[in-house]
Image: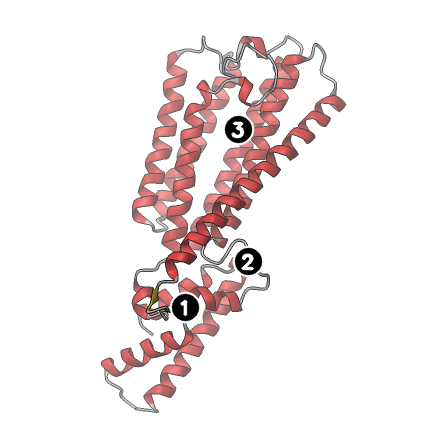
């Protein structure tokens, strides 16, 4: 079959779980082959134009790949439709754990800063309660945003002519690339996250903690050397460049993913050195009893985020090849 069939099959399986894509792709290709052969009427040596025409007819008979993918989906996708479902799953796998790590770290720092002695039971209780709240808010926000986006895509896809909805055609398929859309959507989310990380040195503690921690100043020590801050933003700039390239290319390039992984690991090492050798946290957020504990929690959080990012990146690359 031609590249047209390849694109069609990719559009169908790109919305399905990874572990079922291979079998379903083989099944769809076999179905298309049989239908094309039947249309050619058993011709021994059909002309290329005849084969191409039969292939177009078969693909249009099978219909919109978005709708066909629903037939292979075991669970309903009413609120989050097939257009945004892969992005929703990615967000649940990547953003939710990331928010959990950030919430635990921020609340641990705030708790230790407000307690003369750290009691593990009280610390765990506060971390669990506040982290659950943060996760619920994040889940609701992601769901609402993607649901609205999906409705917008659905409205755009349902163009009508003389009051009748236009039928799907192969010409629409040529402009559709599920894998590219997925990569670009993740790149946009990555850029948003990088911007938020760049703003961390300026975010006041009052945004995370209701009360007076350090007169509403940031978590970061204002006396921290400019070199450390410039190094931090330098690594973020490199990460942003990688995401911009992903956004422009819309393809899974092994070298690009490898460069991104190297930058992530280098930044984790940089942050670890900074946390172990400098007073990174605001002095009013640290106590003699809790300084080491805060340091350990922050370093662990950095590496948990980086490792999870590597796992997510590898999954994205494997699914987009």
Q: Is residue 95 above or below residue 48?
A: above
Front position in the image: 216 or 91? 216
The residue tagged with tag 1: helix, strand or loop? loop
Quadrant where the N terminus lies?
Answer: bottom left
Depth-wise, is mark 2 or mark 3 nearer the camera?
A: 2
Q: Is residue 233 above or below residue 319?
A: above
The residues tagged by marks 2 and 1 sit, at their Cα atoms, a distance apart of 17 Å
> Going from the N terminus, do you reach mark 2 or mark 1 first?
1
Answer yes or no: do the residues labelled 1 and 3 have beta carbons within 8 Å?
A: no
**Residue drawn at point x = 41 percent, y = 55 percent:** 153
The residues tagged by marks 2 and 3 sit, at their Cα atoms, a distance apart of 36 Å
Depth-wise, is mark 2 or mark 1 nearer the camera?
A: 2
**In the displayed structure image, the side of residue 277 where residue 104 appears, left or right:** right
**In the displayed structure image, the side of residue 112 where residue 238 appears, left or right:** left
**Residue drawn at point x = 35 percent, y = 86 percent:** 39
Front position in the image: 177 or 274? 177
Q: Is residue 45 above or below residue 297?
A: below
Question: Which quadrant of the figure has residue 289?
Answer: top right
Q: Residues within 10 Å of mark 1 (few under 14, many from 20)?
A: some
Where residue 287 sits: x, y (%)? Answer: 63, 9
- Residue denoted by label 3: 302
Depth-wise, is mark 1 or mark 3 nearer the camera?
A: 1
């Amino acid at each position: 079959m031609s590249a047209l069939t390849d694109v069609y099959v990719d559009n169908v399986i790109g919305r399905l779980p990874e572990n079922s894509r291979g079998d379903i792709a083989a099944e769809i290709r076999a179905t298309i082959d049989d239908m094309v052969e039947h249309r050619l009427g058993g011709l021994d040596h059909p002309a290329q134009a005849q084969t191409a025409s039969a292939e177009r007819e078969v693909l249009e008979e099978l219909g919109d790949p978005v709708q066909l993918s629903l037939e292979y989906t075991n669970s309903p996708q009413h609120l989050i439709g097939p257009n945004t479902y892969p992005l929703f799953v990615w967000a649940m796998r990547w953003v939710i754990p990331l928010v959990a790590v950030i919430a635990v770290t921020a609340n641990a720092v705030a708790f230790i800063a407000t307690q003369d002695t750290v009691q593990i039971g009280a610390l765990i209780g506060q971390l669990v309660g506040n982290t659950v709240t943060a996760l619920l808010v994040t889940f609701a926000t992601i769901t609402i945003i993607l649901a609205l986006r999906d409705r917008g895509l659905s409205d755009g896809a349902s163009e009508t002519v003389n009051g009748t909805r236009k039928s799907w055609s192969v010409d629409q398929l040529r402009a559709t690339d599920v894998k590219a859309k997925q990569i670009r959507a993740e790149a946009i989310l990555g850029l948003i996250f990088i911007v938020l990380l760049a703003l961390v040195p300026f975010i006041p503690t009052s945004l995370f903690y209701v009360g007076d921690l350090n007169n509403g100043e940031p978590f970061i020590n204002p006396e921290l050397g400019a070199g450390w801050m410039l190094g931090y933003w330098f690594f973020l700039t490199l990460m942003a460049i990688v995401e911009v390239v992903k956004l422009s290319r819309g393809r899974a390039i092994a070298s690009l993913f490898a460069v991104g992984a190297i930058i992530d690991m280098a930044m984790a090492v940089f942050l670890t050195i900074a946390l172990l050798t400098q007073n990174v946290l605001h002095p009013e957020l640290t106590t003699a009893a809790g300084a080491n504990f805060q340091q350990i929690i922050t370093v662990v959080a950095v590496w948990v985020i980086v490792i999870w990012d590597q796992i997510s990146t590898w999954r994205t690359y494997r699914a987009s090849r």
